[in-house]
Image (cartoon, rainbow, N blue to C red):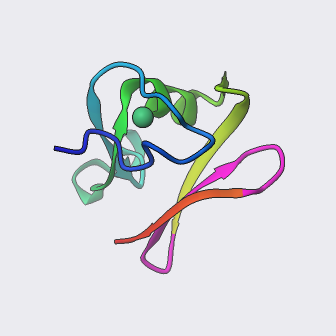
Amino acid sequence: MNRCDPAGIPEHPECFGGGTSQHWPKRSHAGKASVIVARLCWGLHDAIDNGFRYQGRRWANSVTDGVYTITDRETGDVLYERAL
Ligand SMILES: [Zn+2]
């Protein structure tokens, strides 16, 4: 079972910790309207949610028009995307 959808992209060669569910919009803001949009390992999930540097990047994610996208917060590079 895949515990981390972006596992294996060049920018994320290794996972850290167990699998977690990423919700969108953030569960803290949307409550039950929030849905699971990705499986992320704990390390990547924490870096995305808290904005700290991990594996040389600062990570961000978003959902636009039914596509889940992970980007580099600093360069805007698209690192991973997946249709929901
Ligand atoms: Zn991972």
Judge whether 68 appears above or below 52 on screen: below
Q: Residue at x 53, y 34 (%)?
A: 13
Task: Answer with the quadrant where ligand 1 appears in the image.
Answer: top left
**Count of all numbered marks drawn on residues in the image:** 0
Which residues, given as a range, are shown in magenta? 64-77
Q: Which residue lies furthest to the bottom in this view?
A: 65
- Name of the residue lying farthest toward the top: 17
Nearer to us in this view, 83 or 22: 83
Residue 4 % position (x, y): 34, 41
27 is within the stretch colored magenta: no
Quadrant assignment for the C terminus = bottom left
50, 9: nearer the viewer = 9
- Residue at the (34%, 19%) spot, across then down: 17
State left or right for residue 66 relative to residue 17.
right
Q: Is residue 84 above or below residue 31?
A: below
* Name of the residue lying farthest toward the left: 1
Q: Between 68 and 10, which is closer to the camera in this rendering?
A: 10
Q: Is residue 73 magenta?
A: yes
Indicate the position of residue 77 as horizontal and vertical percent values: 75, 57
Which image quarter is the N terminus in? top left
Q: Where is residue 36 in the image (x, y as percent from the top left)?
A: 27, 54
What residue appears at the point 21 percent right and 53 percent down from the top-left corner? 32
**Residue 25, position as x, y percentages in the image:** 41, 55
User: Left or right: where does residue 19 sit relative to residue 53?
Assistant: left
